Image: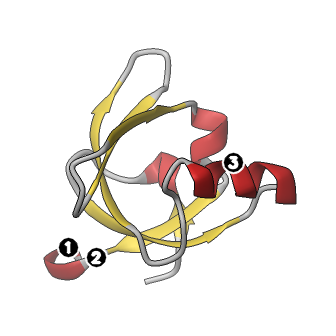
Amino acid sequence: MEPVSLSLALLGQRMQIVSLTADPRRIERLRGLGFGRGRILSVIKREASGILILGFEGNGQRIAIAPEIAQEIQVRPFGGDQ
């Protein structure tokens, strides 16, 4: 399956990060938050404002990101979700 924007990920679906398409400065900030190639996560909740609440697999971390940032994170389904 072709990578898609994280903003299109389905609620609860396990996704694997394929790439970050932001400018270099924002990429460094995203990596500092735990985003990076190969990282597995799922969308836990979608706020009415468009903000996504994400869960990172493996360490139980949760993070909220704005929709415009989600568009810069390319993902694909992971595991049994393919």
Where residue 10 sits in the image (x, y, percent)? 31, 51
Residue 81: give its label. Answer: 1
Q: Nearer the viewer, residue 32 or 46?
A: 32
Q: Is residue 18 shown above or below 72?
A: below
- Bin the neighbour count of mark 2 within 10 Å (Cα to Cα): few under 14, some 14-19, many 20 and up: some
Residue at which label 3 appears: 29
Is the Cβ of the residue at disc 1 closer than 8 Å to that at disc 2? yes
Residue projecting furthest to the top: 48
Amino acid type indicated by mark 2: Phe
Q: Is residue 35 shown above or below 46?
A: below
Residue at disc 2, secondary structure: loop
Residue at disc 3, secondary structure: helix
User: Which quarter of the image is occupied by the C terminus?
Assistant: bottom left
Is the Cβ of the residue at disc 3 closer than 8 Å to that at disc 2? no
Q: Sequence order check: which comes first, mark 1 or mark 3?
A: 3
Q: CA distance from mark 3 to mark 2?
A: 24 Å
Where residue 75 sits in the image (x, y, percent)? 48, 67
Quadrant of res 63: top left
Residue shown at the point (44%, 78%) measured from the top left: 38
Residue at disc 1, secondary structure: helix
Residue at which label 2 appears: 78
Amino acid type indicated by mark 1: Asp
Amino acid type indicated by mark 3: Arg
Residue projecting furthest to the left: 80
**Number of marks drawn:** 3
Residue shown at the point (85%, 60%) measured from the top left: 24
